[in-house]
Amino acid sequence: MKRILAVMGSPRKNGNTHILVSRVIEGAQAGGAVVDELFLGDLTIRECDGCHACWKGKDCSKDDDMCAIYTKIIQSDVIIFGTPVYWYGPTALMKAFIDRLVYFNCPENRQKIKGLSAALAVPFEEDDPETARGVIEFFRKSLAYLEIKLLGQIIVLGVGEKGAIRSKSQSLQQAYVLGRELA
Ligand SMILES: Cc1cc2nc3c(=O)[nH]c(=O)nc-3n(C[C@H](O)[C@H](O)[C@H](O)COP(=O)(O)O)c2cc1C
């Protein structure tokens, strides 16, 4: 049984990212996975300031919600990263979350996420697939650096209004199938 952590990086609940990631979750649960959801907007995750306490065997100096999330990440088999495109990058919520993954950048902590995999879910408004290039590269390179295998991604263009993604039945079906594959 796979343990999946779904990280919602849009501040908009019931928005396009939430709907898209929820479809991935449905597929994963249908495949027998246990899924834990995180809404980054509900949490306090401060910026990493590069103090490197975590590399010296100490707890993170920020002492915020991320400290409990490190344990959740370590206990997971797969992380689903969901973020809309904000100015050709991820949201600030998601960027702060990824910055704090520097915790896993020392040998002692890196081995705690050995075998971890990931998937990516990205909606955005423009009709040009190139719009998501920066976000995809950001995740591709960051995850590769952390030795986290990117198993799949679902990118949905042309959705601006809250809930607009509901009309993209083919994309939502692909999201469901991705979830089944993750499980
Ligand atoms: C601050 C901000 C920046 C955005 N930047 C872009 C952008 O660069 N390109 C784009 O296609 N859409 C952009 N959008 C639109 C969102 O990607 C789009 O509305 C998306 O569906 C929002 O997902 P959500 O409902 O999960 O929040 C932006 C939206 C906001 C609020």
Image (tube, rainbow, N blue to C red):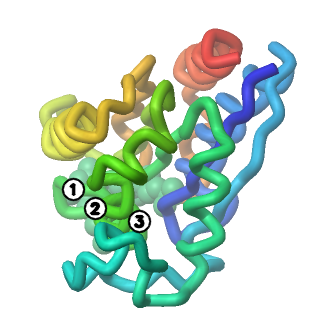
Mark 2 secondary-structure assignment: loop
Tell me whether the residue at label 1 lies in contact with that at label 2, contact meaning CB atoms closer than 8 angstroms: yes
Q: Amino acid at mark 2?
A: Tyr
- The residue nearer to you, when weighing 156 against 121, is 121
Crowding at dot 3, Cα within 10 Å, few <14 / some 14-19 / many 20+, comes out as many
Q: Amino acid at mark 3?
A: Phe
- The residue nearer to you, when weighing 130 against 56, is 56
Residue under the point 52% across and 89% down: 63
Q: Is residue 161 above or below residue 66?
A: above
Q: Which mark is residue 73?
A: none
Q: Is residue 46 above or below residue 35?
A: below
Query: Alpha-carbon distance for marks 1 and 2?
Result: 5 Å
The residue under label 3 is 97
Mark 3 secondary-structure assignment: helix
Residue 27 locus on image (x, y percent)? 75, 21
* Label 1 near ligand 1 (CB < 8 Å): yes
Q: Amino acid at mark 1?
A: Gly
Q: Is residue 151 above or below residue 40?
A: above
Crowding at dot 2, Cα within 10 Å, few <14 / some 14-19 / many 20+, comes out as some
Residue under the point 41% across and 32% down: 156
Q: Which mark is residue 86?
A: 2
Q: Quadrant of residue 134?
A: top left
**Is the C terminus in the top left, top right, bottom left or bottom right quadrant?**
top right
- The residue nearer to you, when weighing 151 against 57, is 57
Residue under the point 58% across and 32% down: 78
Horizontally, is 77 left or right of 145 in the view? right
The residue under label 1 is 89
